[in-house]
Amino acid sequence: MKDKLHLVIPPGLSDGRYGTGIFLLAELQSLHQTGYHIHLHQFTTMDEFSGEELKNFCQEVSLYQPNTGHKAVSFKMPFAVASCYSAPLIEVLKNDNAPVVFYGTETASILLCEGLWHKRAIIRNPYISPIKYLDNCRFSSGLHKKLYHLYEYLLCGRYELELSKHFPVVPITCQDALMYNRKQNCEVHSIPMMVPEQQISSIEGKGNYCLFFADFNEPEQQRSASWLLRHVFKDLKIPFVIAGNNPSDKLVRQAEHLGHVCVVTDPTPNELQDLIAKSQVVLMPVFSHTGIKAELYSALQKGRHCLYFGPEPDCNIIQACCHKARDLSEIRSLVAQLFDLHFSEEDIQIRNSSLNCMQTQSRTSKFVRLLQQQGN
């Protein structure tokens, strides 16, 4: 009989097109390949559930209605955390001894309930939540939004500190692991993103445009797209496509002022894959100092040249497969050069070799051993 594993994910993470949704889908496939019988618990409404692809790798999928309004108001934890408190989920986990992986601290508040203290559980963090709230504060427009994210940041810091006293935290970057050790002195195990065995489908030759794609519900991504329009493509008359869900009206108006820029709103998974495959340069600006930009994985799987700009990357594949810019002048120069540069068979071989290193079983094996150790 296969070993059983519970995965608990917050709202929005079932969308495998962007951000942590890409990260979750890759790790779910990796764990599925180890032979785990996976029971996925998703906080969402049936109308919003977009995880049909996730069902291919799960034996069971349970949906829970997030708390809203006054039910999600708490003076001890952030709104996103309180919205993922579920009595039915608590009962399911109390009555099953299988280990649990909580994706992000947002879903893990139930671990502080009586009866779950000794649960075999780990917290898999795509990013450090308090830092993410600070980023949202920095990148949001409007004083009320900034104050909201600042208040959530203060609550999240205290909540995470209490949670990490009792359960191990598993970030995906060494940088995040060091930050947890320095600030919280908790049990930390750094395991990079687990990637299933797949061959890349990038096409040799030359694409038709530059591309930036993201989840525009994230303030950082709105800021990134706007920054590229203002500082790069205002002067570079190279075709540029911005794709993603819920781009702001302000961003759409900004793009409309430039005749060589197009915004594709809420593309389907197949449409987004097609946009990536036909692009010449995928741009990856990063302004956050926590986690990784998971869109990079999709870009390397299906796209041609990738251009990274941001903090020193804590990721070997960026060093091996991406062009890196250190400043604005270098970004403009590299975009112009790469737009005319043939993407070769040699580039594909280098990328395949680097992705094979990501797909090593050692990451998944380390994760599985950690699960087996909990509660022993």
Image (cartoon, grey):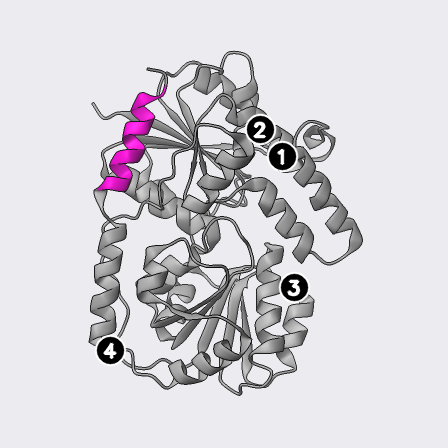
| Residue 364 in view in this figure | yes
Describe residue 68's horizontal placement relative to residue 373 as left or right: right
Q: Is residue 372 above or below residue 105?
A: above
Residue at 50% across / 23% down in the picture? 89
Q: Is 372 part of what is drawn in magenta?
A: yes
Identify the image quadrant of residue 321. Answer: bottom left
Could you tell me which quadrant the N terminus lies in?
A: top left
Alpha carbon of mark 1 to alpha carbon of mark 4: how far? 47 Å
Kindly indicate whether the residue at mark 4 contacts the one at mark 3 (C-beta within 8 angstroms).
no
Whether tag 2 and tag 4 are in contact, CB under 8 A, the answer is no
Q: Which residue is mark 4?
A: 344
- Density class for disc 2 (Cα within 10 Å; few <14, some 14-19, many ≥20) is some
Secondary element at image label 1: helix
For marks 1 and 3 on the same chain, the one whose residue lies earlier in the sequence: 1
Q: Is residue 53 visible?
A: no
**Horizontal side, residue 136 vs residue 31: left or right:** right
Is mark 1 in CB contact (under 8 Å) with mark 2?
yes
Residue 365 occupies quadrant:
top left
- Residue visible at 28% across and 42% down in the picture: 30
Label pair 1/4, CB-CB below 8 angstroms: no
Mark closest to the chain's N terminus, 3 or 4: 3
Task: Identify the amino acid type marked 2.
Answer: Leu
